[in-house]
Amino acid sequence: MEAIADAVHHDLEARTHARDRALSQARQLVRACAHAIRAVHRDDHTQAAERLEAARTLADTLRRDLAAFPDLYFAGYTQDALKEFAEASIVHALVNGGDLPTPEDLGIPASAYVRGLAEAVGELRRRVLDLLRHGYSPETERLLGLMDDIYAVLVTMDYPDAVTYGLRRLTDIARSLLERTRGDVTLSLRQDALERSLRRLEDRLSPD
């Protein structure tokens, strides 16, 4: 009995240590990703790249450290942190016109990746709104097209929430954000056209 108890203690102590370390790393990963996204919106390319590299190191460490504890790796706090890593990586790539990273590129599970893809829609909307504050820009059309492409992918992911960790709700949110952004871009385009028409009219009416 004593030998069994010792073995159980050893296993649980190792598991507890791994969990505590993973919680700390997950928090650091979430912070690094938040800083990376903030840098993307500020067009601070150096800072964004540095934060993403730090995030990648943390994500790789989580995967390595929890290899012996798959239940901890697939726990909510770990997967949420990896989702944030996916989101930051996707936003950085799309805003800067780069190639969309794959789950394999990032070394994360598909379920975390696709949730990060869904949440990237919100950051793309934020980018569009930042641009629209300065008037209509063709870049807003490009970003809107990317949002549309992402949503088209999300609606094909018809799997149980137990497998996708709540993707269906994120897809519904993405749809709402897409439609609102489409309306914002359309309104800005019409305002831009109206302003150009008024300027042409003023030019014709102005005396030489």
Image: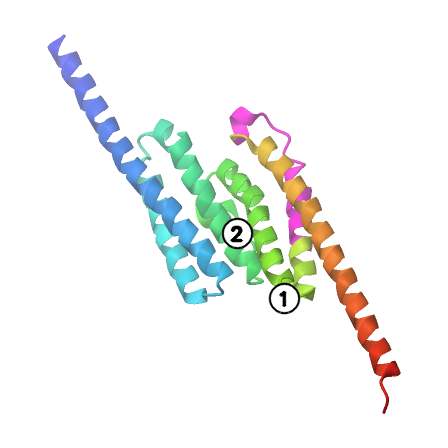
Residue hosting label 2: 90
Report which residue position mark 1 lands on: 134
Q: Earlier in the sequence, mark 1 or mark 2?
A: 2
Is residue 118 left or right of 180 when viewed as pictured?
Answer: left
Residue furthest to the top in view is: 1
**Which residue is located at x 38 percent, y 60 percent?**
50
Q: For the N terminus, give its image quadrant.
A: top left
Judging depth in this view, the residue of 183 and 53 nearest the camera is 183
Q: Secondary structure at mark 2?
A: helix
x and y percentages locating residue 48 in the rendered image = 43, 60
The amino acid pointed to by label 2 is Ile
Q: Is residue 107 left or right of residue 91?
A: left
Residue 164 location (% of width, % of height) = 54, 31
Q: Is residue 146 magenta?
A: yes
Give 5 or 86, whichever is nearer the viewer.
86
Q: Is 4 within the magenta? A: no
Locate residue 193 relative to residue 47 in the image: left or right. right
The answer to whether residue 205 is above or below residue 105 is below
SS category of the residue bearing label 1? loop
Please say if 102 is above or below 130: above
Q: Residue furthest bottom?
A: 208
- Can residue 153 be spotted in the picture? no
Residues shaded magenta: 145-164
Q: Residue at x 55, y 40 (%)?
A: 114
